[in-house]
Image (cartoon, rainbow, N blue to C red):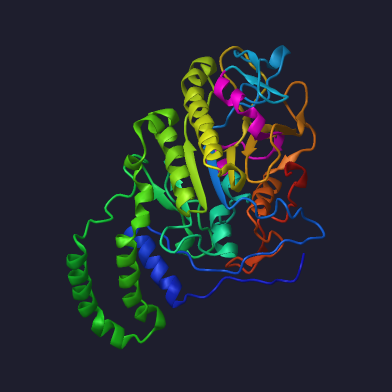
Amino acid sequence: MKQLLNSLDTLTRRNFVERCAATAFGLSVLRAAPLAAADSTTQKQDAFGKAKRVIWLMLSGGLSHIDSFDPKEGKSKGPAKTIRTSADFQVTDFFPKFATVADRVCLIRSMEAKIGVHAPAQYFMRTAFEKRGTILHPNLGAWGSHYLGRSSDTLPSSVCINRRSDQGNGFFPSSYAPLAIGDPAQGINDVKSIGSTSEAKNRLALLNGLDADFRRKFNDKSVEAYNGFYDDALALMKSKELQAFDLSGESQEQREAYGDNSFGQGCLLARRLVDSGVRFVEVKHDGWDHHKALADEMSEVAPVFDQAFTALITDLEQRGMLDSTLVVVATEFGRKPDFSGDGRSHHPVCFSTVLAGGGTKAGFVYGKSDDAGYYPEDDAVSVGAFHASIAYAAGMDIEKPATSPSGRPMTIGDEEPPILELFT
């Protein structure tokens, strides 16, 4: 490993302001950091940094690779039929709309992991680290804030939709945590909860007066920074860019195209946010844990994803944003090939993920599972390598470590290299 080049900053005035903003308003104001440069001797310059923004679609519960993007025959075959796509690979008929945009996606059929329990597996997929002890690891949004700096003067650089903001900043400052949006149709709640701008100034002035004695007694830079928080908070409240969180700015036709549900509207909100300057957006979609009644449950949950994903890819492409936006479809693990006609159990040792845009190869399949879909047969991809590849596409310095509170140097993807074959 290269010599340690980076470490976590101590608490500064800026960090203190960011922590206050994140706590009081749920908004992250991310500090600037130098732009990482690519190593021209080992990396493809045309792909490095091409993904200016990332939309991470998390299918929570464990998507069955065999019943989605890696269909099999024989004993492993599930209830779905295999259909052709616009690319040179097949999927199941649970995903007919996905099939129409398959020539825009890069499909990985050889993912492998080692955790088969939901919560730890989700943590692992979001961070590429196993959760051990008390240390918390950052997701890719936080890594981006660390290496690339803030992506907008006023908006947060990282947002998560349909979930809480945990599994976000990790050991980085709390200002790197994603802004959590519980209901995409509602956007940011309580932004104006303290009244008009004049009323807000009066209230903040009152708080400032009450804190004066405390600040005099404890002459600390962090305490002094509290005044700066007032100004930053008011700037956020007055920002016109906050309109990006308001889906009422979209036509009814566009909203219907994504689907009238939290995932579909979350994908639409993600497109609005990355178009306005947010770098990393996760949209969570629950309902993929099919131990029983797989056919019935897939018939309910798959069309929701199918419609939203296809609308997102089409929308980004029509706006000229797909080449610079990396769309990621991830899940914590796959499902076992053994199919009794009812459901499938957890299966972390082989599953599928999807990438689209952001410099990745279109209509391309990387890796192969065996005939049963039990193990990767060719070009196995670890979760760490998956993360390193996404970070590489986003222009992050994946070899430059950051230091955890325990003093351990850590890199994106836990020192795994990116898979350059995924890129054009």
Left or right: 295 in relation to 156: right
As for residue 98 lying within the magenta part, the answer is yes
Note whether 162 is above or below 39 in the view shown.
above
Note whether 208 is above or below 363 in the view shown.
below
Q: Position of residue 46 (x, y in %)?
A: 72, 52
On-image quarter of the C terminus: top right
Left or right: 193 in relation to 330: left
At 65% across and 59% down in the image, what residue appears? 396
Residues in magenta? 94-122
Q: Position of residue 142 (x, y in %)?
A: 54, 58
Seen from the viewer's position, the closer of residues 335 and 180 is: 180
Residue 67 in which image quadrant: top right
As for residue 80 lying within the magenta part, the answer is no
The number of numbered badges drawn on the structure is 0
Residue 6 in which image quadrant: bottom right
Tell me if I can see residue 407 in this picture.
Answer: yes
